Amino acid sequence: MIELDGRRFNSDNHGKGLTHELQSEISVNGRACGQLRVFYPEDKPFLIPEEQRLIDAVARDLEMWIERKRLEQALVSIAEEQQRLIGQELHDNLGQQIASIGYQAKALEKKIAACGSVDAATIAASIASQAQVAVMLCKQIAQGLLPFELETNGLTAALQAFASRIAATYKITCDFVCKNGVIIRDNDSALNLYRITQEAVNNAIRHGGANHLIISLASNEGILRLSICDNGRGFAGTSAKNGMTPGMGIKIMQYRARQFGATLAFLKRPEGGVEVRLEMRTD
Ligand SMILES: Nc1ncnc2c1ncn2[C@@H]1O[C@H](COP(=O)(O)OP(=O)(O)OP(=O)(O)O)[C@@H](O)[C@H]1O
Ligand SMILES: [Mg+2]
């Protein structure tokens, strides 16, 4: 039996006439968080010191595994927090500053034009229009970092807006299809689904050279399916789709899927390209 943070995990034969017990404490970062307990039948002789050493070794392995899981979790939430901060700064601070430069350049253009200096007025007008473009870019980057629609209108609206943004930015087709009105109430799961979609789409464009993408979200008989299909070159080797690459994207996608008990598959499409398919039970 493993006890971790108040939760118990038993093997099938637990409690069936097993009366003797050896145990080892499990602690992470100096804090006790559970125990590994092994039960034996009364009549079975065993070598206590050897068994105890083995159980201690398994408990140490478990500690390392838990530490790694917590570190993984901390890294992803730090990255999420950083994205949120940078997105907010870009949108609320830098974006506003550039907008005000634009307004002032526009005002300057009018004044210079009134004085009859056409060349100088053209330069001021050009500064104003470049500032406008920079404000738009700031907003676009901030939207990628901070999915505003997700918080206000939910996952479906956020994915729809994301697909339109991708199509407009890369001049490709990116369709979003939602079947049977999917509603995700848990904000963390919705954010994880959104980030997985972002990474799959970026990979399809960057690595697959895809110019047609379909993002689909459907819920059927208690199974939610999110799928991102591309018409790109597909995976070059077998190791990439197993996450055996120096890149972090697929590893983080897999981590995010595990966070809410979903399975993630990277499939070769018969018509070419890749399908990233996530499935999870919703009941
Ligand atoms: N849709 C795709 N089409 C073709 N190849 C892909 C696709 N998705 C992933 N790959 C391949 O899998 C590799 C690993 O992807 P992953 O997202 O883990 O890393 P990365 O994109 O290279 O780096 P990072 O995501 O950290 O910026 C990519 O380098 C690419 O070779
Ligand atoms: Mg990637």
Image (cartoon, rainbow, N blue to C red):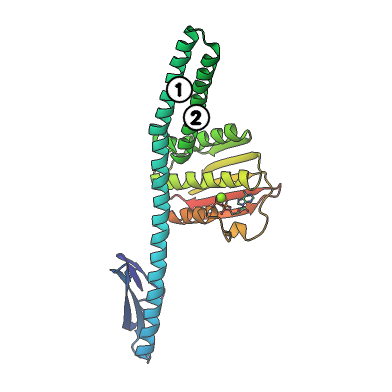
| Left or right placement of residue 116 versus residue 10 in this view | right
Image quarter hosting the N terminus: bottom left
* Disc number placed over residue 134 in the picture, else none: 2
Name the kind of residue labelled 2 in the image.
Answer: Ala
Q: Residue 52: in sight, yes or no?
A: yes
Asked if residue 98 is positioned above or below residue 107 in the image, the reply reads below
| Left or right placement of residue 88 versus residue 236 in this view | left
Asked if residue 19 is positioned above or below residue 220 in the image, the reply reads below
Q: Residue 186: in sight, yes or no?
A: no
Depth check: 96 or 177 in front? 96
Label 2, residues with CA under 10 Å away: few <14, some 14-19, many ≥20: some
Name the kind of residue labelled 1 in the image.
Answer: Gly
Q: Where is residue 169 in the image (x, y as percent from the top left)?
A: 58, 33
Identified at 50% across, 18% down, the residue is: 124
Q: What is the residue that sits farthest to the right in this orientation?
A: 271
Where does label 1 land, which residue?
102
